[in-house]
Amino acid sequence: MTHTTTGTHLASGKTRPLGAPARLAKWLASERVFRLIPFVLVEGLFIVTILIPFALTIWISMLKWRANRPFETAVFSGLDNYAGVLENEQFWFSVGRTFYFAGVAVALELLIGFFLAMMVTNCTRSKKLYTTIFLVPMMIVPIVVGYNFSMIYIDSGPLNQLLSPFLERFGIDPRIRWLSHPVAAQWAIIIADVWQWTSLTFLIFLSGFAALPRQLINAARVMGASPMQIFFRVQLPLLKPAIAIAVVIRSMEALKMFDPVVLLTFGGPGTSTQTVAYFLWEQVWQFNKFSFGAAASILLLFLFSFLIFAGIFTIIRQRNAIAGGR
Amino acid sequence: MRRALSLLAGLSLAATLAAAPAQAQQDPVAQRAVEGAKAYIKAKNLTNPKLTILLSSLYNNSFPDFTKKWEELTGVKFEIVPLGYTDIPAKVMQEAVSKTGVYDIFNDFPYTMPDAAGAKVILPMDDWVAKYKPDFSGIADGLKFQQYYDGKIMNLVNDGDHLLLTVRKDLLENGQAKAEYKQKFNKDLACPDTMQEWKRQAEFFKAKAGETKWGVKFEKDLYGALGYRSINFSYRHFPAYMKGLPFDKDMKPRITTPDGIQAIKDFAASVEDMPKDIQGWGTPQIYPFWASGQAYSAMSFPSIMGFGNSNPQSVIKGQQIACLIPGQTINGQLVRRSPQAAGTGYMVSAYSKHPELAYLFIQWFTSPSIGDEAVAHPKGFWDPFRQSNLTDKAILDRFGEQMVKTTIENSKYAASLLLIEGNYEYFNILDKNLADVMNKNITAEEAAKRIEAGWNKVTNDIGLAGQQRVWRKGVEQGIYLDKF
């Protein structure tokens, strides 16, 4: 049948024009266009999922609008919201507190994760079992972690029961108010975060240890280096990229700390555990101050971007230094 | 035994629900709603009509029993979208922005209503109220007027969550304690009439673990009082301490007045009689603690009594007495104010495809007969609030006659929390500063100044004139009981 048709075309000396779908298919199949398709898709996704929402956020940040008024009533207010954020002392306290939480929590997670990874690496038995156990906290849903810790922290709860023999020996009231004392509540959040996310640093360091070149360590040992020297002069420098990755990934997450705050203290008592993510959530979803929240989030984006890019730059520099050394 | 009890409870629930059509027949309000729904469906020629409700997840185990009944009566199916009550206001505001029309009814505290009304995501019900005539008789003013915002009916309520004081019967009626109290304070030991008297009783009824007092050996510490003192809860209790309204006629905060500062001091001082960690506690901690018998008194939602009687691990079954909310002495008169701390209301979405049908369900559900069934539902969290509850056997059986009588009497003193736009921000400012005073970070005077400044900022940000108008209208209507 096809042959017949083609024969007819040839016989008449004319080519039947292609339909629109066929023309489109032919055009898409052309080498010039085909190469552009992935680029266009990626750019399209970038525009739809990042650029447009970002532009909308900037626009909303320049309006005077609370969601308890219809959007149609919003008016342009220039940089008023930005000024409002910069003048808001709660914003700055939240930023400071976030850095404090992130700094302490990430430092502890790095130390504990590093120590655990080192122990498991050197473990001769049940290595897989320990690895699995230490990875479990990371896999638990944050809301479950939050609820469990809220029960653990009750003043007559298991944590205080465990601590009481030691505290009573020093004449300290064993009923520590983990969730209602301004300082204890901050530590309650840090401990919950450390418990859950040390798993991640452990995993990063574990793979870091596994990737260490055995020849270098063996060579150092043959040359008479002590275990301490091997650790500080050989292993630790080689683990710097893993450390930098752990620092950047965990810092990025810790700066967004939200779940344990909501689940354990709702930012309280007072504002003593209010992080910047909680501050934003409260302003936007509790108080309906969408424009104010948009301005605050843009300011934070610049602040955090600077820090994160500095971290990424550090990783690249470490990697280049090691590559150069080789 | 447990199986037999479960069977009995199941049978009684089935019998209650089976009796619903008969009761609804006798209840013209419910009947009008059913007939109205049928007529609406016919007039609009709807096939498979459906309503969607954004429901507080607390009611996920009880509400479906009523939507099934509604479907049997009218043919209207229901889709229930359960969500934690803390997330509902944000969801409502999302709908205000996105206008999807996926919800027909919003269920939440009445305090979600002002912002929702301001954003025009809920509809006034006045025309339907005029047409279908719901019955608000038997509901105390403070609860009834909570249905209004800016003079319009924007939600119908079916819950009396005004604060109640519950005390331990075994201690209150202990002969030795009564004698000692009388000797010490020259006053009979009974439900406290004033907040000061409650404080005095809370201080009196403190005991250390191992101590024997009034012939009772206490295995664990006994605290004098329990109350909500955490973020998101303090503001619900504070009005019981405040003499009069939080703002004057021009919306100037009264918190810096001597009354306001004293209220902050009294509120903060109350934590001395409570467990040390009380500022971190919500219902999941307070209710079991009360049931464990480690406190003499608890100011709480009325359902705490039900918990104390029905929780399997409770050691205070039958040992509770419901008391009227203690009051304040103002110009020589005892003035009680029981803050309506939570409550449950139902609002019609402005983007519903069938708002009138949504309203008709709300009228049916909040009607005296169906509303009473809801309050009696064993898995529900609706508390008694209507005069008809006093004669409803199922409600009396569930809550106990003494509690129902007291809470209905208490509803006369039920006053709404702030029902103006931005109320959650006003509440939050109050909460945070109260926490700072309770933690002794700042003085009551400093807190009052901060609260005043914060409240003024919110008022000006939203718009002074509009806030003043709605505030005055609410006060004049009687939402807060107190007047200017």
Image: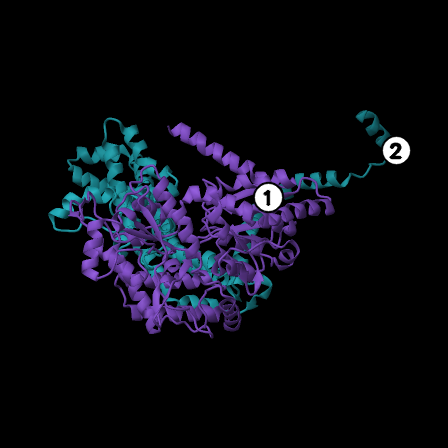
Is residue B456 shown above or below A206?
below
Q: Which residue of the protein is positioned furthest toward the right in this rendering? A: A12
Closer-to-camera residue (A167/B128) = B128
The disc numbered 2 marks a residue on which chain? A
- Counting from the top left corner in percent of width and height, residue A97 is at 32, 58
Is residue A22 shown above or below B390?
above
The disc numbered 1 marks a residue on which chain? B
Q: Quadrant of the N terminus of chain B?
A: top left
Q: Are marks 2 and 1 on the same chain?
A: no
Q: Is residue B203 left or right of residue B454?
A: left
- Counting from the top left corner in percent of width and height, residue B398 is at 43, 42
- Counting from the top left corner in percent of width and height, residue B128 is at 64, 56
Closer-to-camera residue (A261/B111) = B111
At x 38%, y 71%, the residue is B452
Q: Which chain is cyan?
A: A
Q: Amino acid at mark 1?
A: Ala
Is residue A91 at least partly visible in the picture?
Answer: no
Q: Which residue of the protein is positioned furthest toward the bottom in this rendering? A: B250
Residue A12 numbered mark, or none: 2
Q: Quadrant of residue B70?
A: top right
Q: Which chain is purple?
A: B
